[in-house]
Image (cartoon, helix red, strand yellow):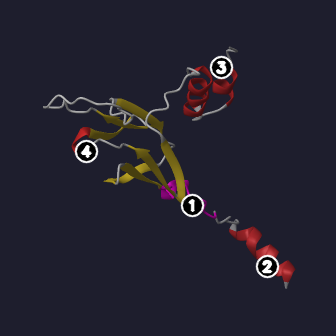
Amino acid sequence: MRNLDFAPLYRATVGFDRIADLMDRALSADVAQPTYPPYNIEKIDENAYRISIAVAGFTPEELSVEVKEGALFVSARKAPEEAERSYLHRGIATRAFERRFALADHVRVTGATHEHGMLHIDLVRETPEALKPRRIEIARPAGVAQVVDAAVN
């Protein structure tokens, strides 16, 4: 696999180190990504998203949803069964898992619900006021403004 050097990016930019780290992780990630459990990521609105994970066989108490270090971690640990069962066919996987989703800046988790074997995690992107576009008024020196006003009339 090809290794990319992001050093020039670090020298020419300020504040984009997280993007470079994300690209580095994506390019060096193991090709065999886990496929269990299956999940969907939906865009609900301009700034709203929902992650839906199939968690059939797990109760809400056996599931864990955490946000730390700019990532969303979803994990499940099945409690050991009290009574030993004899299955003729066992097609419903209830093995432990951990899924990690990298969150963009200013994306926060607003809630999680568990219904009909699905875990729904709602997210919203909230752009801080300081980052929203704003118009800057251009001030003119007092003497220049009078000359310009006189020339216009």
Three-letter amino acid code at the position of disc 2: Asp
Query: Which dot marks residue 7?
Result: 3
- Of tags 2 and 3, the one toward the viewer is 3
Secondary structure of residue under mark 4: loop
Which sits earlier in the primary sequence, circle 1 or circle 2?
1
Q: How many residues crowd mark 4 within 10 Å: few (<14), some (14–19), many (20+)? A: some
Which sits earlier in the primary sequence, circle 3 or circle 1?
3
Q: Position of residue 112 (x, y in %)?
A: 34, 52
- Of tags 1 and 2, the one toward the viewer is 1
Q: Position of residue 100 (x, y in %)?
A: 43, 34
Query: Which dot marks residue 59?
Result: 4
Against 132, is 13 above or below?
A: above
- Of tags 3 and 1, the one toward the viewer is 1
- Cα separation, mark 1 vs mark 2, equals 44 Å
Q: Nearer the viewer, residue 86 or 139?
A: 86
Q: How many residues crowd mark 2 within 10 Å: few (<14), some (14–19), many (20+)? A: few
Residue furthest out toward the left: 82
- Of tags 2 and 4, the one toward the viewer is 4
The residue labelled by disc 1 is: 46
133 part of magenta stretch: yes
The residue labelled by disc 2 is: 149
- Cα separation, mark 2 vs mark 4, equals 73 Å
Q: At 25% from the left edge and 33% from the top edge, which residue is drawn?
A: 78
Q: Along the horizontal axis of the image, is 58 left or right of 138? A: left
